[in-house]
Amino acid sequence: MVNNRTLLETELCDLHLKTPITTASGTFGFGLEFTDFLDLNNVGAITVKGTTLHPRAGNKGQRIVETPSGILNCVGLENPGVDVFLKETLPQLKAYDTKVIVNIDGDSAAEYGELAAMLDVDGVDALELNISCPNVAQGGLAFGTSCSAAAQVVEAAKKRTHKPIITKLSPNVTDITEIARAVEAAGTDMISLINTLVGMKIDIQTQKPVLGNIMGGLSGPAVRPVAVRMVYQVAQAVKVPLIGMGGITCAADAIEFFLAGASAIAVGTANFDNPRLAETISQGIAAYLIDHNLKNIRDLVGKALPNQ
């Protein structure tokens, strides 16, 4: 009898995962909110919602609107701040046999470094740098659209922590491989992609934008072809492991990302429709590996790349 755990176990740098399935930041709360629906012990890793140095109330007005095959959101990084996470949330997460990845957001490179230092504690297994946030120190430019700014964030975080660093890339750039190479050169251990695409919705009755922040991040199945393409491109540009995400709703979707070069995947928007998806997708991937006589998920990674 084939052991599904052996099929799905994978290593991402020093991060050992029981399954290559993680949850995408901002779609799974802190993980504890989902314990009525699935066993967190059966998820490879939980990536908690964006955590900042100080509490944030988030954006005013409507924050989410449905679109064909997805959603637009402008939540605005609402969270209680890193101190509350460390004192109240992390002790509860440590009760589960799963990895914990903390997504962090800062207004400057120095702030990312400070957060990295505060989270260099037992129970936190890796940090994900959300470099799609406004860079207040540089006039509102998002870190993720500038090679130099993105590299500065990675360097600041790497100096202040022993944890593996995952840098989350924005798709809202001309050439995502340039940003990927920059963060790899700066020392990131892994890259996750993609974050949301910028979009908006206008109400034709009021003739006004629907979202309180005017624009928001588009996620869901509509973005998957773009995400697969970008993973495919970045996989050929860098050597660090990739975590693919964007519109994954089933095992078949996830397998596309592995074939494109991802070593792990994250389930995001689909959690709202099926809160057990991060657990059940693993079963479909294991069945696929057995059907194709593959011994481990690593044997699938990058099979669609040139010269493979």
Image: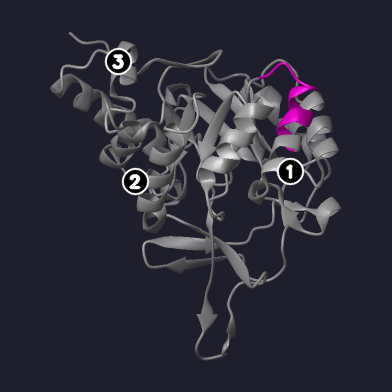
Residue range corresponding to the magenta coloring: 153-163
The first of marks 3 and 2 along the sequence is 2
Q: Residue at x 31, y 32 (%)?
A: 305
Above or below 92: residue 214:
below
Asked whether 288 or 228 is in front, the reply is 228
Q: Amino acid at mark 1?
A: Ala
Question: Is 207 on the left-hand or right-hand side of 110?
Answer: left
Q: Residue at x 47, y 22 (%)?
A: 41
Asked whether 62 or 67 is in front, the reply is 67
Asked if residue 28 can be seen in this view, the reply is no
According to the image, label 3 marks what residue?
296
Q: CA distance from mark 1 to mark 3?
A: 37 Å
Question: Is 46 on the left-hand or right-hand side of 267?
Answer: right
Of badges 2 and 1, the one in the foreground is 1
Q: CA distance from mark 2 to mark 1?
A: 33 Å
Expressed as whole percent of the image width and height from the top left, the position of residue 144 reads 65, 47
Of badges 3 and 2, the one in the foreground is 3
According to the image, label 2 marks what residue?
249
Q: Secondary structure at mark 1?
A: helix
